[in-house]
């Protein structure tokens, strides 16, 4: 039996330590091909490149690290997956993993996440897909603490396949290996960002803003990803791209439309 | 009682005829403030501007057309809503409408849609929100055909409020007014894009790609948005931003994690 083909991508860019760590873990589980953005794409959500050209080239960032072949791409994470599947790969991958993101993609962050949009893009194509994120924005973050858990999740995904229309959003708390309590299957916590716009004036006298903000958890449930992360667990949220609020169809059907 | 405050935005840019039409319809229903991108942002998904500056300015594109005040913004549709709510508006709007998009945002297109990301962003903030899209990419599209239906949907949304955690994704078929059969509450059809990358060589000898593709409907249901649109109805899909696949939690709980 051939080894599973694993497509690795991310949103922090092809040289990011988180991606390099993930490639290293995946090489023990399958044949690894990397298609990743040539520059950071954080906060890109599910953006795709419609009105601009896409460049891609074969690169060799760290082939000894485990990838068979690597491609950088000028586009977004979703573009990388589309280009990889349609143009660059010889066969359909058995799995797509995205990350390891430098920073959390739990709760409402999933909406803004380039990491998760890559996984979702693969999921739309029927490929089992998982986004991994570590709750540590540092470039020197300790990815290795979760290595065993990441491999276990991937092995189980390869063994069981993915429920239809579902991809996994995995977030890892910033903890040393011995403090990680295991993996918890969760729902997405309700939360939002209280933005603060930092208003400044540029050297030419023109006002501009930086988007900043504080995360606000609005959910006391103990079955959420935020609860799991705050309590030492790796959170795993089965995530879907059918956005229909089925429970609301009845309500809206009673409107006078 | 003060008139409801309606925030209008879009992803085609502040000068787009679809937005101008929507402003005109909304001025009959409330006080209108526009915060919209200064350039087209199609396909931006839920991107936000993290590593770059945001500019915004008060503009007067067509104040006689109905808006009290208008702001253009250098960011994405989601940025426009965030900046509008936190910085530009005096009070929380009673409704946010996004569009009218030049082109469909039905079925899987919702994932890539800047129009819908603006509505979702408002929904996250607890503001009733609706994205409107016309299935016609032309700049000269006939928005007026659906004017009465759009106003009815907005009136009903203002009257009933929105089910919690839900925003509306409304798509309008490209039909003359008399051919529109009404509004149908639907679920999101299963579909995807079969991408084709058009590979070319630039004047400097470097290969590049254009992303193109064909829409592929994978859903024979008669309760979907695609069915409604193909049969002369305006589709209305209650859409949520809790992406948890609740039905899959049980499955994944049986994995050996």
Image (cartoon, coloured by chain):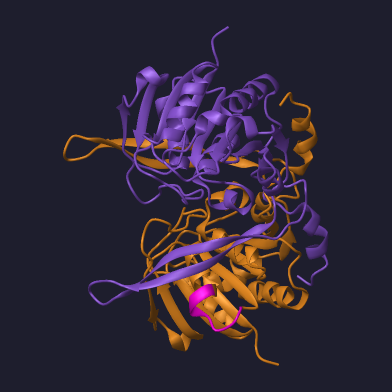
Chain colours: A orange, B purple
Q: Is residue A20 visible?
A: no
Q: Residue at x 74, y 73 (%)?
A: A161
Q: Position of residue A3 (x, y in %)?
A: 65, 88
Q: Residue furthest bottom?
A: A1
Task: Indicate yes or no whether the magenta region holds residue B90.
Answer: no
Residue closest to the eye, A76 or B65: B65
- In which image quadrant can residue A241 be found? bottom right
Q: Is residue B78 visible?
A: yes
**Which image quarter is the C terminus of chain A in?**
top right
**Which image quarter is the N terminus of chain A in?**
bottom right
- In which image quadrant can residue B11 be found? top left
Task: Indicate yes or no whether the magenta region holds residue A88.
Answer: yes
Q: Position of residue B83 (x, y in %)?
A: 42, 34
Q: Residue furthest left?
A: A204
Q: Residue at x 75, y 50 (%)?
A: A223
- In which image quadrant can residue B79 be found? top left
Q: Residue at x 67, y 37 (%)?
A: B166
Residue closest to the eye, A195 or A159: A159
Residue closest to the eye, B75 or A231: B75
Q: Is residue B48 above or below residue B249?
A: above
Q: Which residues are magenta?
A: A86-92
Q: Residue at x 64, y 65 (%)?
A: A123
């Amino acid at each position: 039996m051939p080894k599973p083909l694993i497509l690795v991508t991310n949103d922090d860019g092809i040289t990011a330590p988180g991606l390099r760590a993930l490639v290293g873990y995946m090489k023990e589980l399958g044949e690894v091909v990397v298609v990743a953005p040539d520059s950071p794409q954080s906060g890109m959500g599910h953006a795709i490149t419609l009105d601009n050209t896409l460049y891609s080239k074969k690169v060799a960032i760290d082939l000894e690290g485990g990838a068979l072949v690597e491609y950088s791409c000028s586009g977004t994470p979703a573009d990388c997956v589309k280009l990889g599947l349609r143009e660059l790969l010889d066969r359909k991958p058995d799995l797509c993993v995205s990350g390891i993101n430098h920073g959390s993609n739990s709760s409402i962050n999933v909406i803004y996440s380039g990491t998760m949009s890559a996984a979702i893009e693969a999921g739309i194509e029927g490929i089992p897909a998982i986004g991994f994120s570590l709750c540590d924005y540092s470039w020197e973050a300790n990815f290795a603490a979760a290595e065993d858990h990441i491999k276990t999740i991937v092995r189980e995904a390869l063994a069981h396949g993915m429920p239809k229309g579902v991809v996994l959003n995995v977030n890892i708390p910033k903890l040393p290996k011995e403090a990680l309590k295991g993996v918890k299957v969760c729902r997405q916590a309700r939360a939002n960002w209280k933005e603060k716009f930092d208003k400044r004036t540029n050297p030419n006298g023109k006002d501009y803003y930086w988007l900043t903000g504080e995360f606000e958890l609005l959910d006391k449930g103990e079955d959420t990803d935020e609860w799991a992360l705050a309590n030492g667990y790796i959170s795993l949220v089965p995530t879907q791209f059918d956005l229909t609020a089925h429970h609301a169809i009845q309500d809206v059907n009673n409107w006078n439309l």
